[in-house]
Image (cartoon, rainbow, N blue to C red):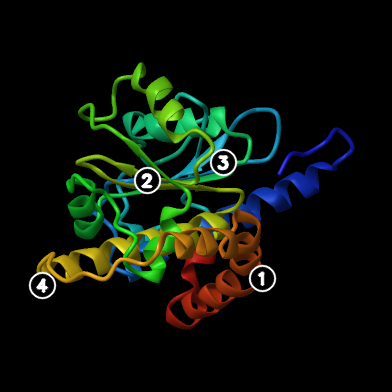
Amino acid sequence: MTLNATQAPDSVEAAERQIRIDLAAAYRLVAHFGWDDLIFTHLSARIPGPEHHFLINPYDLMFEEVTASSLVKIDVDGNPVSPTPHPVNPAGFTIHSAIHMAREDAAAVMHLHTPHGQAVSAMEGGLLPHTQTAMIAGSGLAYHEYEGLAVDLAERERLVADLGDANLMILRNHGTLVVGKSVAACFLRLYFLERACEAQVLMLSAGRDALHAPPPETLSKVALQSSPAGMGLVAERLAWPALLRKLDRIDPSYRD
């Protein structure tokens, strides 16, 4: 979302407030599904406007503790743009800043270190197209080789080049990463990718013999059926409102 010069300050504040609520909800959902890694990994979202500001988690909070107001507003270098009682992890924003700045459509970026995502990231064949979920996720999947902890700014160019116009990425020997035009679209992609990785680990635990691979024409068909535009509508109008209702039943404090 890009604001133009005619938009009033209150509309800017309202837009940021909604993004804060959605991103806080995403953090809570990651914790709910057991995808968090203590205080590590990050979900980020771009705030509309020309300043290139972003929201990210306070480095000292568990994902289940994140609220809309506790999210830290940072610049492209990962530094807070206003006083905050919470520390932030600029190094952790290296990956996110590269993608946010290179892709206008990357309003949200989410990166995880789940056991299943890490397991698939270490497999030579990557994500296998043996389940419907994997076919949906794999139709827009890229790969990036592991270069060590993400503190080297020079890696950003290679990361962006490997991602290209894809919306999902396996970070080799590391984890998973997705981008989206909104927090809702990004989270739904994350859900499909993580579920696909989980299914693959379970599938391969029984051995590689006698696995049934779908025919190539089916892969192409599923790619068309799960286009980014179509999945975006499903996320925004169906899945995300349902997920917010779920969180409101469990603990609505993410909205605070």
Q: Secondary structure at mark 4?
A: loop
Give the residue type at disc 3.
Ala
Q: Which mark's residue is nearer the viewer, 1 or 4?
A: 4
Residue at 15% across / 65% down in the picture?
204
Q: State the separation of the CA atoms marked 1 and 2.
A: 25 Å
Extreme residue in the top direction: 154
**Looking at this view, is 53 or 222 the one in front?**
222
Residue that label 2 marks = 42
Q: Nearer the viewer, residue 143 or 157?
A: 143
Q: CA distance from mark 2 to mark 4?
A: 33 Å
- Amino acid type, residue under disc 1 in the picture: Arg
Identify residue type, mark 4.
Ala
Q: In this picture, is 74 found above or below 186?
A: above
Q: Residue at x 12, y 68 (%)?
A: 209
User: Would you say the residues marked 3 and 4 are in contact, meaning their CB atoms lie under 8 Å apart?
Assistant: no
16 relative position to 192: left or right:
right
Q: Is residue 254 above or below residue 250?
A: above
Res. 106 mark:
3
Residue at mark 4: 206
Q: Residue at x 28, y 61 (%)?
A: 197
Q: In which image quadrant can residue 147 be found?
A: top left
Q: Within the image, what quadrant is residue 237 found in?
A: bottom right
